[in-house]
Amino acid sequence: MADETAPEARRCGFVALLGAPNVGKSTLLNALVGSKVSIVSPKVQTTRSRVLGICIRDAAQIIFVDTPGIFEPRRRLDRAMVRAAWQGASDADLIALLVDAKLGIDRDTRGIVKSLRKTERKAILVLNKIDVVKRTTLLQLAEALNGEGVFTDIFMISALTGDGIDDFAGHLAGTVSEGPWLFPEDQITDIPMRLLAAEITREKLYLQLHQELPYSAAVETESWEDFDDGSVRIGQIIYVQRSSQKAIVLGKGGQRIKALGAAAREELMVLLDRKVHLFIHVKTREKWADDPERYRDLGLDFDV
Ligand code: GDP
Ligand code: MG
């Protein structure tokens, strides 16, 4: 057991999870931590700012940094996300580059490998989604990437089924430096509960609205009230850019927002392990994507 580890034998380190959007970074993080700390969706770019996921394995406390996907930035928000991703990587002790084995080496992955080579940083290669890839394809991909000369190790995993994850975690546990743990052993993330609660609602928003809503829609937790009976009242606002989008989020007779709120509330109750009263309002704010305040709230730099 972790808590029986002699303090002097302990290890601790930061591991940055890098990779193109949608390769499965958040899914892997949640699998490693054993709880949902980073939101997952089939739509790209759902991880906006850095999320730490903390797990204890053997004598090591491994602190994972889930980053927004690294991709070619166009808009201001995109640039801020890419910068946050690279910052996460430069602060870390180890870098794990995730690649979608089904998709292979796309432009984003090629770009990341190139940057790693340029900065002379070594990384662990993690080929993900092996549950949907043929063995021969997998080996070819491993060989091609191994030839880049930036990888110290290669792991083949499925973040979805859990295949290979244990080996990967074991390797990290043995590789991070000796040193004291930086977080209490029951802590699994560093993001404040308010933010996590907003992320959960944002995930429901994406899952239920699919292509109908641009990813610039945002959720904020504006109030959080703990009651003596153990329950909590959480107030949130969903910001959209146009009134037409507001109508979509609300749905006919408020059906959409009701379903969305119910799903978010259910997940919050499990996460917080208590009764949750969730109140969600939808507001229109045109200039969201250009508002410096929002960037600070998300832990991103505005001026990039
Ligand atoms: P991120 O953008 O890199 O954080 O990717 P996500 O974790 O949000 O995952 C993107 C999509 O890939 C989601 O639909 C996941 O369910 C899916 N996914 C992640 N890992 C696996 C895997 O090992 N196998 C399969 N088949 N799908 C996966
Ligand atoms: Mg993600």
Image: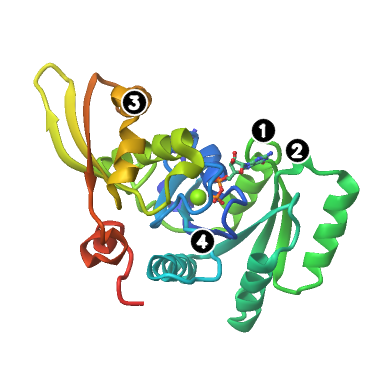
Residue indicated by mark 1: 161
Q: Is residue 185 above or below residue 149?
A: above
What crowding class fits label 3: few (fewer than 14 Cα within 10 Å), some (14-19), or many (20 or more)? few
Disc 1 or 2, which lies upstream in sequence?
2
In this view, the residue in front, 67 or 254, is 254
- Say which mark, if any, is on residue 252: 3
Cβ at disc 1 under 8 Å from ligand 1: yes
Residue indicated by mark 4: 177
Disc 1 or 3, which lies upstream in sequence?
1
User: Residue 82 appears at what percent x and percent y?
Assistant: 47, 68
The answer to whether any part of residue 186 appears in the image is: no
Q: Nearer the viewer, mark 1 or mark 3?
A: 3
In this view, the residue in front, 279 or 56, is 279
Q: Residue at x 33, y 48 (%)?
A: 190
Q: Nearer the viewer, mark 4 or mark 3?
A: 3
User: Which residue type does callout 3 highlight?
Assistant: Lys
Disc 1 or 4, which lies upstream in sequence?
1
Q: Quadrant of ligand 1?
A: top right
- Say which mark, if any, is on residue 270: none
Lateral position of residue 71 relative to residue 87, left or right: right
Residue indicated by mark 2: 131
Q: Nearer the viewer, mark 2 or mark 4?
A: 2
Q: Residue at x 56, y 42 (%)?
A: 42
Lateral position of residue 31 relative to residue 61, left or right: right
Q: Nearer the viewer, mark 1 or mark 4?
A: 1
User: Residue 238 appears at what percent x and percent y?
Assistant: 27, 42
Q: Dots 1 and 2: beta carbons under 8 Å?
A: yes
Cβ at disc 2 under 8 Å from ligand 1: yes
In the image, farthest residue toward the right: 136
